[in-house]
Amino acid sequence: MKILSAKNHNVVKSFCYITYQELIAKVISPANVGALHYSKAKAQSPVIAANDAPNKTKGTVLKHDNFTLLRLDLDDTKLDIDSIADTLEGMGIESYIIHTTASHQQDGKGNRYRVYIQIAASITYKVWALVESYLSHVFMADDCATRPQQIMYLPVRFDGDCYEYKIGQGEPLDVADSQILVNAERYAQEQTKQQEQAIKSAPIKPAYKQNLVGKQISIINLVNSGYTWEGLLSHYGYKQQGKAYLPPEATSKTAGAYILTSHTDGKERYYSHHESDPCATGQCLDMFDFIVIREYGGDYKRALHDIAKTQFKQIHKHNQQEYFTHLHNESVNAFFAGGEA
């Protein structure tokens, strides 16, 4: 089977393909880029995808629908390379590659690994996503199932790196006939049940009232329409596992935070079961609520002022002008009302 590859992440056409054995060779003997900072060394890395599509765009990958590799992103994991290998082998995965990333143990960062699992036959996106979500749950890794087009950076060596790799040699994983697929289907079913229960039982937090005058524009509405849940959760260190998310404070391996779509107004809101999650308020939160809790400790007034000044500067100036106009009009109206009296 083929694996889509390119010489670096900037490539948008003229892709090539490598075999799993060639991937092993690239991990065993990475190119040495010398005295480069790890962030710049990463930019020199060859990249691969988990499929053999003609290019790396999401539309093409999904239309091609042929995945030839399983992968895992383990960032800031408590596991070391041997415990990752032990877990894989305990699950019946014999043929695998583990290597550290360029940022592994750099500038105070923790353990960062990439894992590739050889499969016996190509699989569809539906099956690939099921298995990826389950494996991410097992390893408390970031679930890439929603990003089928995501590339992986192959290793390069550079001065001061902490490079490690480990190769598991055995039979490729027969996904269709594996206990892993059975477990993945059960896991997905359980997540669906939990999500449905949350939708039925979780009340919606009433929206915070922003006092608007004149033609002022709502900062809350701008936040709720200007951000995405995927971007927010990623920014605050959440790890996606199938339909659920694992908060950065979570001590369990089971993700219990969801983005729920309301049956009443069709809006997406955040709901969490995690006791350690500061956003687990027992209510469904909009993006503004989420940011206020995460960034401002629940202080809505301070959040409104700060977000307006830093994120929506022109709107903030407009709102200030509208406020001054409102005060002026009130003063004029009071004057004439007093004169008439």
Image (spheres, rainbow, N blue to C red):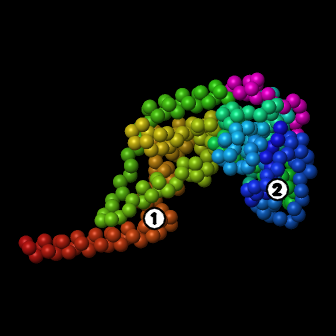
Residue 168 inside the magenta-drawn segment:
yes
- Residue 215: image location, x then y, percent: 33, 65
Say which residue label 2 marks. 7
Residue shown at 83% from the left, 52% from the top? 155
Q: Which residues are magenta?
A: 166-183
Q: What residue appears at the point 56 percent right and 42 percent down from the top-left corner?
A: 276
Amino acid type, residue under disc 1 in the picture: Ala
Please say if 16 is above or below 115. below
Q: Nearer the viewer, residue 75 or 22?
A: 22
Q: Quadrant of residue 114?
A: top right
Q: Give the mark, 1 or 2, whose residue is nearer the N terminus.
A: 2
Picture quadrant where residue 51 is located: top right
| Residue 43: percent from left, percent from top | 78, 60
Visible in this render: residue 292? no
Along the viewing direction, whichever of 226 and 232 lies nearer the viewer: 226
Q: Position of residue 213 (x, y in %)?
A: 30, 64
Q: Residue 200: which quarter of the image?
A: top left
In the rendered view of the protein, which quadrant contains the C terminus?
bottom left
**Callout 2 environment at 10 Å: few (<14), some (14 to 19), or many (20+)?**
some
Mark sitting on residue 105: none
Which three-letter amino acid code belongs to the residue tagged 2? Lys
